Every structure is written in structure tokens, then in C-alpha cells.
């Protein structure tokens, strides 16, 4: 191979390697994805979920765990269009490995709503409403790629977290999960991949057809 050609090939290979080197090969939708990372949270941030007035530190942590579970549950349902993300497998593994902590979070939250309500029935109704709104808050269409990519990363972290430390994953990654609900696209070449697609169809008026064939002489060329 000519030295000049060989050098060009190596240069091109290096450029493409640089574009993809910072992104996980199993979960890449863009040449360069938006960076959704955020700092640790306390659980008291109003933008993270529904407020829990009068909650104890244990109840706040339980809500964080439940928010994490809700986000990854939604991801397991919405992100299976890309099986390489493993959102379903990771979610099922989390439910199994962290079952005790998840049950503890459920019981703690249920007790909170019962404690804050006038009756036990009213408290359980409030808890059901909390769960429904928490799940719904993670449903997205326009930001699906970013959300699914982030969920794949975070759900993997839950599998490596020791039992009893799922709350630590929630503290460290709930900001990132929330950030991923904002739609962003390609970051390496923003707007460079826009293209217009035309679909050319014939005129479907009966007079434009003769014996099952389109009559160009009578109706002209197909229109877009």
C-alpha cells in the first residue's frame, strides 16, 4: 500500500476511534451523546419527585429508592426496542438482588402516607397516587434515547451495588436520571444529520388509470 494512502487510512481510523471511545459500545445512539451527569442528591430537592412534607430522613431515603425503582421499571417497559441496553435483564436482577431493601422502602412509604392521613384507607389511597405519579413522571417520547441510554447505565450500577446499598445508587444517580428526561440529540455534529425524505405517489383519481396502469400522458408525472 502506498505510504500516503496508508497514512490517510490510519488517520481516518484514529478520528473514528476518537468519536466513539468515550461511549459504551452497547448503548450508543449518537456519535456523541449529551452528558446528563449530576451530583449526589439528598432527596429533598423539589424537582426530583413529589414532595413529602413532614417526612423523616428514613422516609426521604425510601422515596429516593422508590423513584429509582420506578424509573428503571419504566425503562424496562419502554427501552426494550434496543435489547443491547439490557434494561429488562438489569431491572429483573435488581428486583431479585435488592428485594429486601425495596420491600423496606415500600413499607416505610406506606407507613408515611398512613401516618399523614386521617384514616388508613386515605393513606393507602395517597400512596397509590404517589406511585402512579412517580411512574408517570419518567414516561417520555422525545427524550427516549437519552433516557434509555442513561437507564441502562444506572440499572447496571444497581447490579454491582452490595445488598442494602440500593439507596446509595439512588443518591448518586437520580439527578442523572431526571436530567435524561430533557431531549437532546447529536452532540458531535449538531444538526448535521438532518435530511428530507420525499414519498412520490401517483394520482389516485380513477380517470388517471387505464387497465390497472397509471396513465402518464393523461395525468402527468407522479407528484410528491
Image: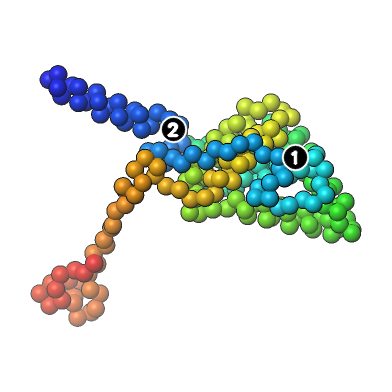
Whether residue 221 is visible, yes or no, is: yes
Q: Is residue 50 above or below residue 16?
A: below
Whether residue 211 is visible, yes or no, is: no
The structure residue drawn at horizontal position 25% and vertical position 29%, both measured from the top left corner, is: 12
Q: Determine crowd level at label 1: few under 14, some 14-19, many 20+ residues with C-alpha closer than 10 A.
A: many
Indicate the position of residue 210 as horizontal and vertical percent values.
Answer: 16, 76
Indicate the position of residue 8 as horizontal and vertical percent values.
Answer: 20, 26
Q: Quick one: quadrant of the C terminus?
A: bottom left
Q: Residue furthest left?
A: 217
Quadrant of residue 174 within the rendered picture: top right
The structure residue drawn at horizontal position 80% and vertical position 39%, both measured from the top left corner, is: 58
Which of the two labelled residues, at mark 2 and mark 1, occupies the earlier sequence position? 2
Q: Which mark is residue 23?
A: 2
The structure residue drawn at horizontal position 54% and vertical position 53%, both measured from the top left corner, is: 140
Q: Is residue 210 above or below residue 83?
A: below
Circle 2: element type: loop
The structure residue drawn at horizontal position 73% and vertical position 52%, both measured from the top left corner, is: 51
Quadrant of residue 98 within the rendered picture: top right
Circle 1: element type: helix
Residue located beneath label 1 in the image:
61
Amino acid at each position: 500500500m502506498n505510504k500516503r494512502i496508508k497514512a490517510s487510512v490510519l488517520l481516518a481510523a484514529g478520528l473514528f476511534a476518537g468519536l466513539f471511545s468515550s461511549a459504551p459500545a452497547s448503548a450508543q445512539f449518537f456519535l456523541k451523546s449529551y452528558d446528563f451527569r449530576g451530583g449526589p442528591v439528598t432527596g429533598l430537592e423539589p424537582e426530583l419527585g413529589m414532595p413529602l412534607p413532614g417526612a423523616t430522613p428514613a422516609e426521604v431515603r425510601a422515596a429516593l429508592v422508590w423513584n429509582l425503582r420506578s424509573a428503571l421499571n419504566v425503562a424496562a417497559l419502554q427501552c426494550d426496542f434496543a435489547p443491547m441496553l439490557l434494561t429488562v435483564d438489569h431491572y429483573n436482577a435488581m428486583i431479585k438482588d435488592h428485594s429486601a431493601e425495596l420491600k423496606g422502602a415500600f413499607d416505610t412509604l406506606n407507613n408515611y402516607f398512613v401516618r399523614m392521613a386521617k384514616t388508613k384507607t386515605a393513606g393507602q389511597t395517597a400512596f397509590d397516587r404517589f406511585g402512579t405519579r412517580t411512574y408517570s413522571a419518567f414516561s417520555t417520547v422525545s427524550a427516549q434515547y437519552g433516557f434509555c441510554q442513561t437507564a441502562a447505565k444506572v440499572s447496571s450500577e444497581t447490579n454491582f451495588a452490595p445488598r442494602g446499598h440500593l439507596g446509595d445508587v439512588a443518591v448518586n444517580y437520580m439527578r442523572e436520571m431526571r436530567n435524561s428526561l430533557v431531549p437532546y440529540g447529536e452532540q458531535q455534529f449538531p444538526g448535521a444529520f438532518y435530511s428530507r425524505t420525499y414519498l412520490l405517489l401517483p394520482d389516485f383519481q380513477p380517470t388517471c388509470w387505464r387497465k390497472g396502469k397509471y396513465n402518464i400522458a393523461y395525468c402527468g408525472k407522479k407528484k410528491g
